[in-house]
Every structure is written in C-alpha cells, then in structure tokens.
Image (tube, rainbow, N blue to C red):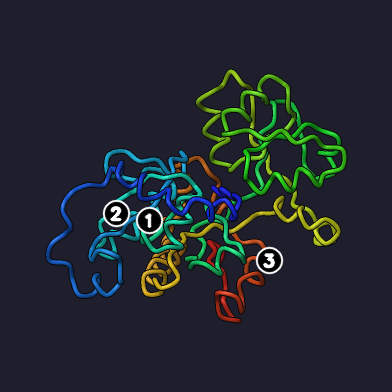
C-alpha cells in the first residue's frame, strides 16, 4: 500500500498537481462556522483537508468527493473527529509527493512508505499500518525466502523499490511494468514466476480475476546479515506506511497521528484492515527495525510504534 516508489520521480513533477487539481472531485463551498480547535490545525483552508491522491484501489480511489479504500477510510475516521472535510485532488504518485513538499495540499495518502529521504522534505504520521512483503504467485507454487527466488523471472511495477531488490537477487530477471495489470497478466500467462505488489492489490486481484489462478504469499524477510551483504534486500522486509504532510504542518500531523494511535487501541484499524481483505496480524504489528529507523530522526528517542499488541 507501499506503494514504495521512487522518491526522485517526485522532484521532476512539481507542476503536475495544479493541472490535476482542476479535475478534483471535491468541489463545493468552504465550510462555515469552523471551530477554533479545527482552525488551529493550520490546514490551507480552515475546516478543509486537501488530499492529493492517486487512484490505487483498494487503498485509495475517488468516488464523487469521497476517497474510498483502506487509506481513505482511515483518514476519514480521523478527519471526522478533527472536524475536517476531505477534499481530494487527483494526481499521480510523483505529483502526490510534490504537492506536499511544495505545500499545495495538506496531506497525501495511499501506502506511502516512510523513508529517511522523504522525511527530510515532509512530515510522516505514525504508521496507519505496516505493509508485509507480499508476493503474487501462481496457485500451487510456493516461495518463502529470497533464496527461493534465485534465477526466476520476477515482476513489479516501474519505479517501485522492489525493482532494486529484484535486481539484487542472483540470476533473477527483472520484468518491470507500467502498472499492476501487466504484472498479473504475465503471471497468469506464466511469463513470470512471482510478482511483487502491495498485498491488498494482490488479494483484490484474486477475487476479481479468478481465471489467473494466483494467490498471495508472504515472504520470510531476509536476515540482518543478508541485508548487510545486499542492502537492496531491505525492500523485501515489511515497511511502515504513513500519511505524508508538509514540513510546516506540525499541528496537523500530531493530531492525525493521535487519531491513528487511538484506532490501534480501540480496534478500529483491525476492523478496517479486515474490511479490505487484509490480516491485522500481518498489517498492524511493527517489525523490530521500525522503531530504530525513526528514533532520533523524526521521532523521540523513546518512541514506540503503535501496535495491536499492547
């Protein structure tokens, strides 16, 4: 729901968002009688949460003025409790990041992976979920570790960080596609053995395209020793997602993070993950390196990542 995508691509798309915003589905007048508490959150328009989003079902898709999907549901829950009306602006992934970094939107969502580079140019909320390393495979085939992938034809979408991981697998051949449909088509046809995509994408494809005869498997993450020997293997590990905001939006980030943390505690996140086909045990428990990656970087030294295990 990583979309774990190339950070560099965002820097070449600084002019994408205004054109896309003209097609925004979230029209209408600005809200009246906004409370002082809501106004203090510092959104670009008081009472309105301008959200850059790329259609990426079942994480995000725009229907009318509503963002539908796992990320959309999580943000809507937080926005309702903060008194904010969501106003989506449709763009592509590079435009999402660029819109945040230039502060033309308040936030962007949709399986965005936390990285040290991205946090230098924006703010990340606490993780709304952790994306496990998922593989789309043909039914009857089993792959568990990186070693199982050696010498195979492996597919993913252009710009996803799995490109780097696949290139590091001995003897593996990378097949990069413009979108997930290309991955599924070639997987179903037997031209690739494994496709690396966000898990809910694979789960949705299983239901929508049963003729492909594919299934979802979760990789056993590579060990620390393997990652040290081949740093690109880090992208075969679970990654933490986040909602991404401009650097100056500190009050808004803290408020949304607080809502996310509460959703771990009250069971709302587990409910939403299940709604969209995911397993809370896979999505809502952080790996050990989540805390160490952010402590002293964009979180306090004693920060504890949210989890359904308290």
Q: Label 2: state its secondary structure.
A: strand
Among the two numbered marks 3 and 1 on one chain, the one whose residue lies closer to the N terminus = 1
Q: Are marks 3 and 1 in contact (CB under 8 Å)?
A: no
Query: In this orientation, which residue lies closer to the viewer: 172 or 132?
Result: 172
Q: Residues within 10 Å of mark 3 (few under 14, many from 20)?
A: few
Q: Label 3: state its secondary structure.
A: helix
Q: Is residue 281 above or below residue 56?
A: below
Q: Nearer the viewer, mark 2 or mark 3?
A: 2
- Mark 2 vs mark 1, CA separation in Å: 9 Å
Q: Is residue 126 above or below residue 201?
A: below
**Residue at image mark 3:** 289
**Residue at image mark 1:** 75
Residue for point 25% across, 70% down: 38
Among the two numbered marks 2 and 3 on one chain, the one whose residue lies closer to the N terminus = 2
Quadrant location, the C terminus: bottom right
Q: Residues within 10 Å of mark 1 (few under 14, many from 20)?
A: many
Residue for point 55% across, 67% down: 119
Report x, y in % for residue 285: 59, 59
- Mark 3 vs mark 1, CA separation in Å: 25 Å
Q: Label 1: state its secondary structure.
A: helix
Report x, y in % for residue 290: 63, 66
Q: Are marks 2 and 1 in contact (CB under 8 Å)?
A: yes
**Residue at image mark 2:** 86
Residue 298 relative to residue 133: left or right: left
Q: Quadrant of residue 296?
A: bottom right
Report x, y in % for residue 154: 74, 35
Report x, y in % for residue 125: 47, 66
Residue for point 43% across, 44% down: 60
């Amino acid at each position: 729901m990583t979309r774990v995508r190339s950070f560099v691509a965002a820097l070449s798309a600084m002019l994408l968002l205004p054109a896309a915003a003209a097609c925004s589905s979230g029209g209408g007048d600005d809200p009246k009688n906004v409370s002082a508490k809501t106004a203090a959150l510092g959104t670009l328009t008081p009472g309105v949460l301008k959200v850059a989003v790329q259609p990426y079902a079942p994480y995000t898709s725009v229907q009318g003025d509503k963002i539908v999907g796992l990320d959309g549901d999580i943000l809507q829950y937080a926005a309702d409790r903060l008194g904010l009306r969501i106003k989506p602006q449709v763009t592509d992934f590079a435009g999402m990041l660029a819109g945040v970094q230039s502060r033309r939107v308040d936030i962007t969502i949709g399986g965005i992976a936390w990285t040290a580079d991205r946090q230098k140019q924006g703010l990340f909320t606490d993780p709304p979920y952790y994306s496990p390393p998922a593989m789309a495979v043909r039914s009857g085939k089993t792959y568990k570790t990186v070693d199982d992938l050696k010498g195979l034809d492996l597919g993913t979408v252009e710009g996803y960080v799995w490109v780097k991981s696949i290139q590091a697998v001995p003897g593996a051949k990378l097949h990069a596609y413009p979108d997930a449909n290309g991955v599924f088509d070639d997987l179903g046809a037997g031209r690739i053995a494994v496709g690396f995509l966000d898990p809910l994408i694979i789960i949705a494809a299983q239901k929508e395209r049963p003729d492909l005869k594919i299934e979802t498997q979760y990789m056993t993450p590579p060990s620390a020793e393997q990652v040290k020997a081949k740093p690109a293997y880090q992208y075969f590990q679970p990654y933490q997602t986040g909602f991404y905001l401009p650097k100056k939006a500190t009050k808004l980030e803290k408020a949304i993070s607080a809502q996310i943390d509460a959703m771990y505690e009250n069971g709302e996140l587990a409910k939403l993950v299940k709604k969209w086909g995911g397993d809370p045990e896979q999505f809502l428990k952080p790996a050990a390196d989540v805390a160490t990656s952010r402590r002293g970087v964009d979180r306090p030294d004693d920060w504890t990542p949210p989890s359904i295990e308290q």
